[in-house]
Image (spheres, grey):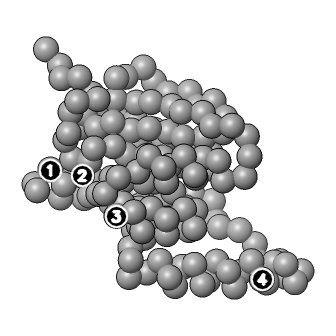
């Protein structure tokens, strides 16, 4: 008999995904990891998210509005839970609550690097507001996908040993 996914406390109590901007390939990696490792993964977005049927996967839709999904993630996340996001202010809030953050490109945001990331984000916002074309991030590459999968596996393996 399989354990109830809500009552299972495996590697992380839960992984929360800022699903509004999460690339489909990263969502697929997370779905496979959730099922394989029996980890609860919650995708939070202001739109409907289609997920494969699994007791380990949940989708939660918030109301439309600026930062509604981010606010919901910050409300829900607990110490040592993992959040997948590229949103730097959200990452800072999660770290402040004791959570962990991994970007869809496999970068870890930590207390040691988040202040620098926030400063760079603010600088780029200022540049864009002054009319500078700063461009956006490059498209997801195969290397980005592999880096994410490797970092996720590393985090989950570390947690399983604790």
Q: CA distance from mark 1 to mark 3?
A: 18 Å
Secondary structure at badge 1 equals helix
Tags 1 and 4 in contact by the CB under 8 Å rule?
A: no
Q: Which residue extends farthest right? A: 131
Within 10 Å of disc 2 (Cα), the crowding (few <14, some 14-19, many 20+) is some
Look at mark 4 in the image and give the residue it sits on. 126
Indicate left or right for 136 with 90 as reference: right
In the rendered image, which residue does mark 1 sit on? Answer: 160
Front in this rendered view, residue 150 or 65: 65
Residue 124 percent across, percent down from the top left? 71, 80
N-terminal label among 2 and 3: 3
Query: Comparing marks 2 and 3, which lies closer to the viewer?
Result: 3
Sequence-earlier tag: 1 or 4: 4
Q: Residue at x 62, y 37 (%)?
A: 62
Q: Residue at x 54, y 79 (%)?
A: 117
From the viewer's side, name the closer residue of 32 and 102.
102
N-terminal-most mark, 3 or 4: 3
Residue 98: which numbered mark, if any? 3
């Amino acid at each position: 008999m399989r354990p109830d996914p809500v009552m299972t406390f495996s590697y992380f109590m839960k992984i929360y995904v800022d699903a509004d901007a999460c690339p489909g390939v990263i969502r697929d990696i997370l779905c496979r990891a959730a099922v394989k490792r029996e980890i609860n993964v919650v995708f939070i977005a202001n739109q409907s998210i289609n997920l494969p049927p699994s007791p380990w996967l949940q989708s939660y839709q918030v109301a439309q509005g600026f930062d509604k999904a981010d606010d919901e993630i910050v409300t829900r996340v607990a110490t040592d839970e993992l959040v997948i996001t590229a949103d730097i202010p959200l990452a800072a809030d999660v770290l402040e609550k004791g959570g962990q953050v991994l970007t869809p490109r496999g970068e870890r945001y930590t207390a040691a690097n988040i202040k620098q990331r926030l400063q760079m984000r603010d600088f780029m916002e200022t540049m864009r507001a002054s009319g500078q074309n700063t461009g956006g991030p490059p498209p997801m590459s195969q290397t980005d996908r592999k880096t994410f999968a490797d970092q996720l596996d590393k985090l989950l393996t570390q947690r399983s040993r604790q």
